Amino acid sequence: MKRILVIVSMGILSLGWSITGPELLKKLDALSEMRTDITARVTISQQKGESIQKLEAIYYRRDADDSFLIVMTAPDKEKGNGYLKVGENLWMYKRNTRTFQHISRDESVAGTDARSGDLEKRKLSELYTVARDENNLEKITEEKLGSIPVYKVELIARVSDVTYPKQILWIHKENFLVLKALAFALSGTLMQTIYYLKYTQIQGRYIPLQQIFIDEFDQGNKTIFELSGISFDRIPGHVFTKAYLENLSK
């Protein structure tokens, strides 16, 4: 921590303590890392104009070997489709053609505004660095999101294989949970706004139970991503394989 001048939301200069970029990213990484396997039911509600589509899936994640699997269970036209990540490899599986396709982290999940990169474990401190202004000061400010005191921080990617090369986060000052995020394309175009509406704390880690993804590029589209039925039972290793996903669709 370092002592600096900060500008509060009312525009008045005050002398206080402010967190540094590396400290902030380290705290976010620590809160999100899962020390055990996790299985959960996923409900994805996609709104496009007046149309609303609801999808259901089962989500498996193991941070120990950087793997996840999401298997669609409803509706029938999506049942058996899935997304598998093992290490640096990320595949999309189509039941009707029984084929796997290598995809990038910005691949849409079942045509929704949620991205496959949103489901994996990757440390923010390894992917991003805090942007700096013309005076070489970190772009971290203290303000309020509604009535909640937050840190607003601008991040730029330090690696190329990220879903979005620039993000702006609003982070709760007391518990360091991300409450809102803006995601930008390389051109600087705002692509997506994400709201983290509900968290649960289990075994000292925080899991977002409800997120809303708003498509800023195609106005009127939004996706609600919800987790339920969370379990921390050990997941057998064969679950994170192509063979397991193929067998589910037989």
Image (cartoon, rainbow, N blue to C red):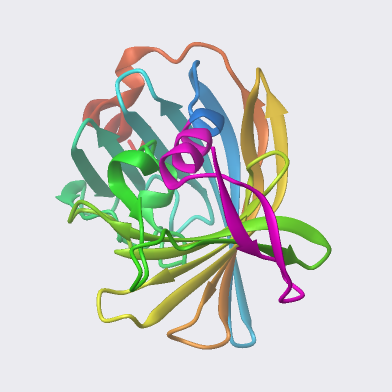
Q: Quadrant of residue 155?
A: bottom left
In the image, is residue 171 above or below residue 221? above
Q: Which residues are magenta?
A: 1-29
Q: Give the side of residue 112 with respect to residue 162, left or right.
A: right
Frontmost residue, 61 versus 81: 61
Q: Residue at x 36, y 40 (%)?
A: 125
The image quadrant where one finds the N terminus is: top right
Q: In the displayed orientation, state which residue is furthest to the right.
A: 147
Q: Residue at x 71, y 29 (%)?
A: 201
Frontmost residue, 51 versus 80: 51
Q: Position of residue 210 (x, y in %)?
A: 67, 51
Q: Quadrant of residue 148?
A: bottom right
Q: Give the side of residue 145 with respect to residue 222, left or right.
A: right
Q: Position of residue 225 (x, y in %)?
A: 59, 55
Q: Quadrant of residue 199?
A: top right
In the image, is residue 241 above or below residue 13? above
Q: Position of residue 222 (x, y in %)?
A: 57, 73
Frontmost residue, 53 versus 17: 17
Q: Give the side of residue 129 with respect to residue 168, left or right.
A: left
In the image, is residue 232 above or below residue 3? above
Please say whether residue 28 is one of the residues in the magenta stretch: yes
Q: Residue at x 65, y 21 (%)?
A: 204
Please say whether residue 85 is one of the residues in the magenta stretch: no
In the image, is residue 89 above or below residue 241? below
The image quadrant where one finds the C terminus is: top left
Frontmost residue, 96 versus 124: 124
Q: What is the number of callouts on the image?
A: 0
